[in-house]
Image: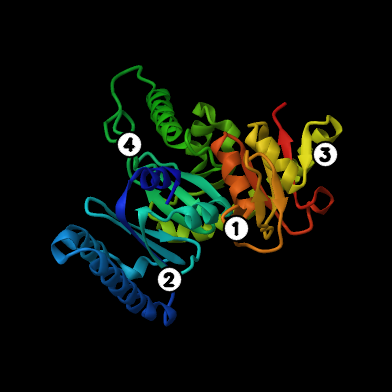
Amino acid sequence: MNRHDISLLQAIQGYPALSILLPTHRTSPDNRQDPIRVKNLTAEAVDRLLQEFSKREAQPLLDNLDAIVRDIDYRYALDGLAIYVNKDFARKFYLPFSIAERVILDETFATRDLVMAMNRSPRYWVLALSEKSTRLFEGAHDTLVEITGHGFPMVHTGPGGESALPGGFGVNKSAYRDEYTRKFFREVDAAFGEVAKSDPLPLLLVGVDRHLAFFNEMTRHGSLLAGSMQGNYDATSAHDLGKLLWPLVLEAKETRRQELLQELDAAVGAQRSSSTLGEAWLQAQMGRVATLLVEESYHQPARLSESGMLLTLVDEVGGLDVVDDAVDDLVEVVLQKGGQAFFFDDGALAQHGRVAVILRY
């Protein structure tokens, strides 16, 4: 699941919109219970629907639900499963994070838990460079999901790729091949840009030295590059590639965290920062936050002012005017207004009240 999927789900409105969410398991024997849990939750959903609608009225939704449940492949289960169905729509998502088990009937699909979990997950892009088939993956933790669309996977069909190089006296085949290889990776970079423009995550590259060099020469997305792994991984599965890349993800993440702490120190000195949840919330509402830094396990209920600009921290959730977790809402506001959010180990931001922002101005 990516931000495009979230936006698609959030755009669909109309009662009844059915959401079924549950944790799942990657390995045996725990994963044996997953089909049973799905069956039980599906039965609960059907029962609730038939309490409100006649069988004839509910049938289109029930047919979509039955089809999407039959399409679940438990061999590819991760840590969570989300199913969204209405009379015209049905999608399922295998999630690399656990979610609470719920069945929800509402005017809209239940995406809040997924948005918040996604915001707190290390996410990144991976380009596995190859003239045979350059693949694009979206990563979350150590799990990769291949992106099919936007031209991917991309194959070099020109001279030096699937087409033969020209022959004849005086033809420099090596230079000719390099020229068309550069052209191919320029096209790869352009296609990646279309995917990443709405979700500019860090980019990891995989490929042989020659392909890495060509892509680095051609790319217009150097600011996203976070690391590379050399080698031919054309035949490597998404599962295995994710495991191989995970140490590189952690290394890049730690490097970026240290850079951000230095940037925060500089912003403090330049009076271009704010600390504490309340101050960060106000700056985010004003659209001034370029970068949000927050501790991993920081969750805080709060009461919103009538204007929505001010927060008052409270001890417990409950009440129509209380936000269950103002930290997660803060993250989403920052992202919606074009900022970035990064998470740190607990205690790393203690002097800032567990949250700090670097301001645009």
Q: Tell me what residue is drawn at x 21 percent, y 66 percent.
A: 66
In depth, the one of 170 and 303 nearer the eye is: 303
The label shown at residue 310 is none
Callout in the foreground (3, 4) = 3
Q: How far apart are marks 1 and 4 (CA)?
A: 41 Å
Q: Tell me what residue is drawn at x 72 percent, y 57 percent.
A: 345
Q: Tell me the crowding category of disc 3: few under 14, some 14 to 19, or many 20 or more residues within 10 angstroms, Cα based.
A: some
The residue under label 2 is 24
Q: Tell me the crowding category of disc 2: few under 14, some 14 to 19, or many 20 or more residues within 10 angstroms, Cα based.
A: many
Q: Which image quarter holds the C terminus?
A: top right
Q: Which amino acid type is shown beneath numbered disc 3?
A: Asp
Tell whether 145 sits left or right of 116: left
In depth, the one of 186 and 118 nearer the eye is: 118
Q: Where is residue 1 in the image (x, y as percent from the top left)?
A: 42, 52
User: Mark 1 vs mark 3: which is more N-terminal?
Assistant: 3
- SS of the residue at dot 3? helix
Q: Distance between the residues labelled 3 and 4?
A: 42 Å
- SS of the residue at dot 4? loop
The residue under label 3 is 265
User: Mark 3 vs mark 4: which is more N-terminal?
Assistant: 4
Tell whether 148 sits left or right of 100: left
In depth, the one of 65 and 136 nearer the eye is: 65
The label shown at residue 324 is 1
Q: Tell me the crowding category of disc 4: few under 14, some 14 to 19, or many 20 or more residues within 10 angstroms, Cα based.
A: some
Q: Position of residue 264 (x, y in %)?
A: 78, 39
The residue under label 4 is 151
Q: Which amino acid type is shown beneath numbered disc 2?
A: Thr
Q: Position of residue 164 (x, y in %)?
A: 27, 31
Q: Where is residue 21 in the image (x, y as percent from the top left)?
A: 41, 65
Q: Which amino acid type is shown beneath numbered disc 1?
A: Asp
